[in-house]
Amino acid sequence: MLNFDMYIPTRIIFGKDTQKNIGALLKPHAKKVLLHYGGSSIKKSGLYDTVTASLKESGLEFVELGGVVPNPRLSLVHEGIDLCKKEGVDLILAVGGGSVIDSAKAIAVGLCYDGDVWELYEHAKSISAALPVATVLTIPAAGSESSNGSVITNEEKQRKLAFGSNLMRPLLSVMNPELFYTLPKNQIANGVADMMSHIFERYFTNTLQTDLTDGLCETTLKTIMKNALIVIQNPQNYDAWCQVGFGGTIAHNDLLGLGREQDWACHGMEHELSAIYDVAHGAGLAVLTPSWMQYVYKTNRNMFVQFAVKVMGVDGSYRDPDAIVMEGIARLRDFFKKMGLPSTLTELGIEESKFELMAKKATGAGNGSEHPLGGLKKLYRQDVLEIYKLAK
Amino acid sequence: MLNFDMYIPTRIIFGKDTQKNIGALLKPHAKKVLLHYGGSSIKKSGLYDTVTASLKESGLEFVELGGVVPNPRLSLVHEGIDLCKKEGVDLILAVGGGSVIDSAKAIAVGLCYDGDVWELYEHAKSISAALPVATVLTIPAAGSESSNGSVITNEEKQRKLAFGSNLMRPLLSVMNPELFYTLPKNQIANGVADMMSHIFERYFTNTLQTDLTDGLCETTLKTIMKNALIVIQNPQNYDAWCQVGFGGTIAHNDLLGLGREQDWACHGMEHELSAIYDVAHGAGLAVLTPSWMQYVYKTNRNMFVQFAVKVMGVDGSYRDPDAIVMEGIARLRDFFKKMGLPSTLTELGIEESKFELMAKKATGAGNGSEHPLGGLKKLYRQDVLEIYKLAK
């Protein structure tokens, strides 16, 4: 096991009716709040009214900025920064899913940074301050409600980049699984694929002697999968949502990755799909992950046997480990299909003619400074290209 | 699953050599530190020198107070409070195990409380402030390095009481498993029994629909047990210590108890042993837990079948669940024996003549305000007495 530094300070207020208390929760921390959200869904559902009523009741001033889209845009982040400066906002409340929270985090760090906020994302600069962010989660998926990261798309440059700092971990997040009841099935499925990928990226490692986090990863994956199949059939099953929802938080608060070399190749490969085609992140991950497994597993066969046996429940002959791995991958594909997720890049509308370009961009090979993706196996442009082809 | 409020802000700096950096870690948070510790072991091991050198190097002033004993005493807490007031201490650094950390926490809250600190423990008062506490852990067991609780013994009153507040969660804790290499075997075993009990107290519940935390409890228990058998044989096995050590933190930071009704009867029954006989907490728990299981399991047989199958690996006939439970309990007893832990109260030197008194005190039955112990099954004086007898 590797040395690690764990810091998961976000308070999680979980369960029925918790969103009604958001004003009182924020009161000790803020005077004027930016209420940040996406489209009209929180107005239709009544959540907007609940939240604003609670803010008012607690005597908190607020201004608002809606309009966050999936793969949240830099332009809106700039708008948010300007608005917060003008209005003297001291806390940002994101009401929405990962995109809204990521956008809120970008505003929060941009406000405390002298240059343009995109520089932070482009050059992974270190920061010394950020405005506090709080969240009311409406889509369990990205784990951004307690993670240290944010992913923003620069629409002019067609670049989707991640930036992370412990200063970006939300102060508190409210999660009421009842708010997930009205999610469309494709969003449920994409979210589940995303949270599973957050675990995969941490689980698949060459680091040895990681019993505890191996087990935490495995049980969280199994729990999410079991309960995801319930909520995709019955999106009003509160108890199953509790497991999936909190599973998504655990999946990405970094507990499961402590002391392990992490991978993150699938996220790197997927970001290029989203940047060019604006596909849903989770759908892209569901397509790429099994092909990635197929391509890399021989680098660390034992790790993939463990996955197949302990997560996917494969009971094969130990004398044919490749068959065990293949069965594990097949079961994962099957699970994604049951969730209604796509299996191929073609289904996502991604043309083979773009594979070369995406592989170049994913590995930086295009601009003369190639940096391979991945921890378990280093993936260069040619490797990424092969994985895109496998996923065709 | 029940609603919950998770707050685990303690930063954990984990791994080799981490203790050498304690001064730099504390520097942003303190000017003058109380260095709090137990006996001479940290001086013999060189840890005292390492820590004080690091504090000096970072330009931190410090005063010191040693002398914490297992089942830490109120009198020393009073001494610590007086010393910190006199010296203007602004952070307490506990270098030791759970007793030292619990004592440090008591000093930290006592300093910010107008009355006598024992009132907090006796009447579970709410507090609004506490000095920050940091720790360098030398015994993995109590989980106090990131928990919200502290247990103090009032030696005059022969009362051992717990007090908890999120303000008592340490600011940061340093854990280098190499520091555990020199622990005597009985301390290792007691520590393992204590951390396992912290999980049992959360795991055994009547709350339904708790897949995720069930799984987290089960994998953490299995990992601790597997690796505990390694370190008890070879206390210099770094990797096994990593799993046991961090397992002990996870066991008690409350992640595993989120959304579940918790039990805590065994802790309640054990505290009476420690208060009167000053026995090691973990040893007392190892004796009482299997008898508690035997006494209560019929209240929720399915829960105990799950424990036997998923944690203890029992593969019995589903048509005879009682046999599965009994085999699970037998395996737990066997595990404790392999760790060198006692099996009976007699081995601990506890006389049957005291059972009645301890049962009265544990349930408050003595002073006319009986409060049953336990969540899974409410235990009144007579129940506790029966369990002491089973454990005789």
Image (spheres, coloured by chain):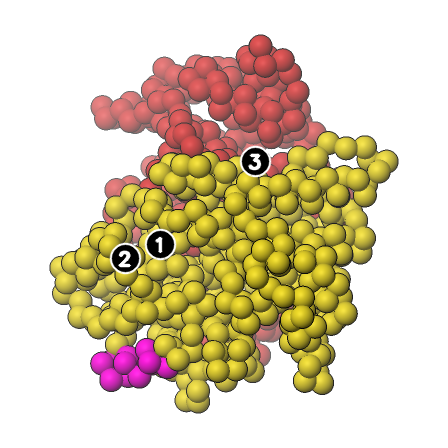
Chain colours: A red, B yellow
Q: Circle 3 sits on which residue?
A: A218
Q: Is residue B34 left or right of residue A32?
A: left
Residue wearing tag 1: B138
Q: Which quarter of the figure has residue B352?
A: bottom right
The part of the image, by quadrant, that contains residue B357 is bottom right
Kindly identify the amino acid type of the residue bearing the numbered disc 1: Thr
Mark 2 vs mark 1: give the one in front.
Answer: 2
Q: Which of the 4 image quarters holds residue A178?
A: bottom right
Residues shaded magenta? B78-88
Q: Are marks 3 and 1 on the same chain?
A: no
Image quadrant where one finds the C terminus of chain B: bottom right
Residue drawn at x 37%, y 28% as measured from the top left: A375
- Of the residues under marks 2 and 1, which one precedes in the sequence? 2
Give the residue type that dot 3 points to.
Glu
Q: Which residue is mark 2?
A: B42
How far is disc 2 from disc 3 in space, using C-alphas?
Answer: 38 Å
Q: Secondary structure at mark 2?
A: helix
Residue in front for this viewpoint, B79 or A358: B79
Between disc 2 and disc 3, the foreground one is 2
Q: Residue at x 57, y 43 (%)?
A: B337
Q: Marks 2/1: CA distance? A: 9 Å
The residue most toward the top is: A319
Question: Looking at the picture, how far across and down is residue B319, in whole percent?
Answer: 86, 36
Q: How many neighbours does mark 2 have within 10 angstroms: few (below 14), some (14-19), or many (20 or more)?
A: some
Nearest-to-viewer mark from 3 and 1: 1
Residue that appears at 48% across and 82% down: B156
Amino acid type indicated by mark 2:
Ile
Q: Is residue A30 magenta?
A: no
Instruction: Locate the N terminus of chain B by quadrant.
Output: bottom right
Q: Chain of mark 3?
A: A
Between A161 and A239, which is closer to the camera in this rendering? A239
